[in-house]
Image (cartoon, rainbow, N blue to C red):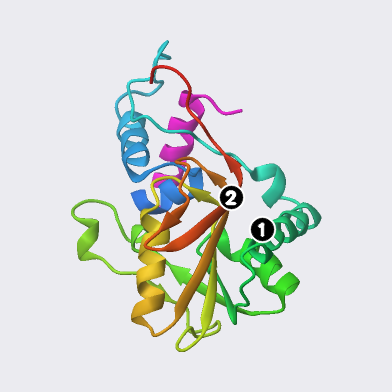
Amino acid sequence: MKNVDDLIASAAELADRGLSKGEIADELNVSRETASWLVERSGAATKPKPAEKPDGPDDIHVDWNAIGSGGKRLTYIGRALADLLLETHEEADVTIGIEKAGVPLATSVSRELETSLGAYSPAKHQWDEGDIEDLGGGFSRNFAPVDGRKCFIVDDTVTSGTTLRETIESIRAEGGEPLACVVIVDKQGVEEIDGVPVYSLINVVRVGEQ
């Protein structure tokens, strides 16, 4: 399990590779605010001093490398996600993976449910500084279109729900119909977003003082 100093070092390494803060948030499975704090801390000192209680944003880091690094394990998780979607009793035409981590998961889900495969790149991948509302995401033309089609949405984690909401809105703007979202870990206990149900394999519940 990574501690805060490990995350700061990882954020520094990713920033040095040229990733935006939004991409760093995606890679570390943390919020944009947490990613920004980690990057800033990485430049504050050569070796950050450990603190008894980190003074950064209230967030939870999810490391699912043990799943992502094994094709067979990833397939099993994809089957479990597909099984959750079957409980909706809905039939989709396209399974949309949210880049980056959601795409390999969606690939496994689409294979299990026998749907087409789509990919959505969220606005946060372009975000570094300034207002993210001025940026936009988009669907990859190398994958299935969503116009006039019913869609499942797949991602790895829910941190705030912003990316899922953006994807839902984009599907509707393209003339598609979002049926349900599914993730591995939900940090917020989100049950639905804009009328679209959200299913998760794991829910994280904070107990006690933050």
Please say whether residue 66 is visible from this viewpoint: yes
Q: Is residue 19 visible?
A: no
Three-letter residue code for mark 1 = Leu
Majority secondary structure of magenta residues: helix
Which of 46 and 183 lies nearest the eye of the viewer? 183
Residue 7 position in % (x across, y down): 48, 32
Q: Position of residue 146 (x, y in %)?
A: 48, 83
Q: Residue at x 42, y 10 (%)?
A: 52
For residue 67: magenta?
Answer: no
Q: Is residue 3 magenta?
A: yes
Please report whichever mark, 1 or 2, sits nearer to the chain's N-terminal start: 1
Residue positioned 22% across, 61% down in the render: 133
Q: Residue at x 57, y 54 (%)?
A: 199
Mark 1 closeness class: few <14, some 14–19, many ≥20 residues within 10 Å: some
In the picture of the structure, the residue carrying the numbered disc 1 is 84
Secondary structure of the residue carrying numbered label 2 = strand
Magenta stretch in the rendered image:
1-19
Location of residue 105 (image quadrant): bottom right
Residue that badge 2 annotates:
200
* Residue 20 x, y percent position in the rendering: 35, 53
